[in-house]
Amino acid sequence: MTQGAVQTPAADAPSATVRSRARMREQWKGYAQKYGALATLAVLFLYNAVETPHFLTKQSLLFILLRQAAPIAIVAIGMAIVIGTAGIDLSVGSVMAIAGQVGATIVLHDHPVVLAMAAALLVSAVCGFFNGTLVARYGVQPIIATLILFIAGRGIAQLITGGELQPLANPAFQWVGLARPGGVPAQVIIALVVAVVAWLVMRLTVFGRHVLAVGGNETASRLAGVPSARVKLYAYIASATLAGLVGLIAVSANSASDANNTGLGMELDAIAAVAVAGTPLTGGRVTVWGAVVGAVMLKLLQNTLIAHGITKEVAQMIEGVVIVAALYLQRHES
Amino acid sequence: MGDRPPLLLSMRGINKQFLGVPALVDASLDVARGEVHALIGQNGAGKSTLIKVLTGVYRRDSGTVELDGAEVEFHSPHAAQLAGVSTIYQEVNLVPFRSVAENVFLNREPKRYGAISWRRMNADAAALLERLDIRVDVTRPLYEYSIATQQMTALARALSTEAKLVIMDEPTSALAEHEVKTLFDVIRRLRSDGISVVFVSHRLDELYAVCDRVTIMRDGHTLEDRPMSAISRYELVSKMLGRELAEELSQRRSAVQTGVEDRVPVLEATDLHRGRALEGVSVAVRSGEIVGLAGLLGSGRSETARAVFGADPLDSGTIKVDSQPVTIKSPRDAVRHKIGFSPEDRKTDGIVPQLSVRENMTLALLPHLRRNGIVDRHRQAEIVDRFIGAIGIKCSSPEQPIRELSGGNQQKVLLARWLCTDPKLLILDEPTRGIDVGAKRDIQVLVRQLADEGLAVLLISSELEEIVANSDRVVTLRDGRAVAELVGDDINEGALMQAMATGAAADTGSPV
């Protein structure tokens, strides 16, 4: 190696100061992308700590903020994995409704609680298998493939009970939505466990690394022997199964299964949570904790606005602005 | 030049730079009226840039363009089209879901009382296509028809704009044999109507079949402008590649390793067929041997590599690994048989840009690094560090994103991606394209060293010099067929060019 590895023609080499300034801007943007959601969360937190009465109480933090954010966070984690493969899953809300209906119906027919939960999760996994097969095997665009269950799934959920609201009163089944072991809402604990497991899977397993490779460059991954179809299939199954789990939480927390409203709009909340955390929708990156932070941040933003008497309509507009700001930060990615 | 008809197009002294890098240097192109003019050159020779300067996609830095004796400067392809210069691209750029007639008259629909006159549009489109001897239902959507018909539709569109000059950029690459014939008939018809054609293709047979004259480009320069009948295939190829017989290089390994010839081939691919891309390619690689795969662009070099690796499906042909017939349906199958493949286009097919050097290097190895379902980070780090040191990869740390590395270092990471899987056969498609001289030498030395240690290597390169300097055996492809095989000291640039230019389909193994 007698030659230098990098030879830049002097003519188009920008001056050192210009380059370092560009580098700094690049770096700053990197931080903003990475920690923007966390910083916003911190600001909102401080603001509320000062301005909102009773904000810094266990009741307010655990039972309002985190309890409300937990379901979104769990779905957002699944969504983040799918988005990591350069896909998207619009069906999560409908899958929640299906899982809730399946679980509630079985338990209302006096079958064991474990069976009800297992069946609900299994049905959700099958939904994910359907999505994943369309995307990975038949090459259907993810947004279209998952739109099918987004629409049809709610119909299926309604068919299970004929659209009737089913009141629930089964503490064992409703543990996931109502219990508070050690004074902490069960769904908050579940969300934490899911996040830790997902984080470890993404970091440590071959599957996790394959997700990033497939999302980052599918052709190259395939040429390196990565089973890209299987990786995508598993991602959709994971997303749907997590949605199913949240479906169970939702019907339990409400003490009623409602095919019409369970998980309504959840897909958008989850995508927003992933997006505000700086995860590019073009794939190749997954930040599990980002999805969690994004979910909590958006929920806190909502609650803050409502607590300060801002109408829901205006609150939604402000949420939109926050998402636009997040997308602006990552517009030059990839 | 004798009886050459008057010039329709004359481009002279064209210069064009991109960010200070010259793409065209004093380039020229003359096309006479009613002439079919071949424009040839290797990748990056400047053909496309010259065409884009002509059609107003790019602005020239200097030089003159005369059309019909008047100086012109088009600011958009649309302006060029209005002046009678139409381009038919390799990938037809029409609207698949609209009808044939609509495509012909897109943006110039015949109107009646302000509304589209469908009756007139359909009749006119049918008439135009009939001029090309194509009879189809012009009211059907375009996508229902073959690529050939779609091309004819693009051509009909060009004719409807009263084109004087039609530029065809590799029009035959997507066509079947009989469709090529139809296209040539049409081109001849255009010629007799006084319309000029600029024909870009890499298939020599086609150039000689249909072109009157040829302009050869290399490194942004125009080298030759001659009647097709006044230049031999051999001369054409050597001008294009920029190699004269005289300037031969002799750094190639002089003797073939003893004993290699007797070894059982690691890879034996026989009679590979895939559409018109591969029409009978056979190649064998033994352990310890570097086999070069030579040929012009489009001769089937990369297609052979991709087919062997399972990246593209085969129509027919057999592949044996260690004398055992195998089915390779996907790159995964190939990897399982211990074959590695470093693709031609590093950026789109090789690296995963946002991932680190470590992740990129161990992408193929990852399943083997699994212990109790978890990636063994310790072993991973150990392997990555070893290869970074052994191959001399310059990076700030294994965690640096690969996109920040220079081309040569990216290429080394991709090589290491396969080397760490301990392959039997390594297929290298243009392993040194676009990388600096130092890294290039590093890679070539490394590959030779690996072969000496027993690795079988299939080396593809468009640089003759690289093939000659590094191969123990060379299989030459022409138009999707293996046409010649050279061994040891018989390998030289002259013989290779001869084979690329005129080699006839023959059994591999018999030297020319």
Image (cartoon, grey):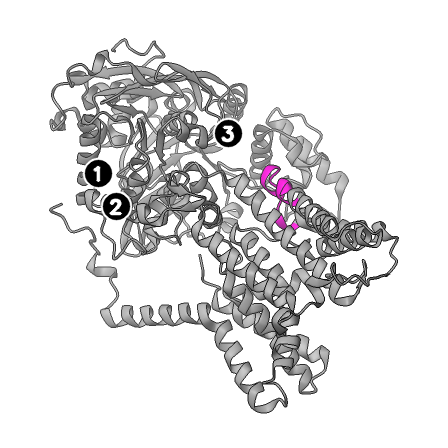
Q: Which mark is residue B408?
A: 2
User: Which residue is disc 3 drawn over?
Assistant: B174
* Amino acid type shown at disc 1: Ile
Q: Is residue A204 in the magenta section?
A: no
- Look at discs 3 and 1 and give the one toward the viewer: 1
Q: Residue A24's quadrant in the figure?
A: bottom left
- Mark count: 3
Which chain is mark 2 on?
Answer: B
> In the structure shown, which secondary structural element does the residue marked by tag 2 occupy?
helix
Label whose residue precedes the other's in the sequence (1 or 2):
2
**Are discs 2 and 3 located on one and the same chain?**
yes
**Viewer-nearest residue: A175 or B348:** A175
Q: Residue B427's quadrant in the figure?
A: top left
Which chain is mark 3 on?
Answer: B
Residue in view at x 55 percent, y 61 percent? A193
Q: Which residues are magenta?
A: A131-143
User: Which residue is disc 1 drawn over?
Assistant: B443
- Residue contact at pointers 1 and 2, CB within 8 angstroms: yes
Label 3 to label 1: alpha-carbon separation: 34 Å
Q: Residue A272's quadrant in the figure?
A: bottom right
**Drawn side of residue A229 relative to residue B354, left or right:** right
Rendering coords of residue A236 (x, y %) = 60, 48
Rendering coords of residue B56 (x, y %) = 44, 50
**Are discs 1 and 2 located on one and the same chain?**
yes
Label whose residue precedes the other's in the sequence (2 or 3):
3
Rendering coords of residue B235 (x, y %) = 25, 23
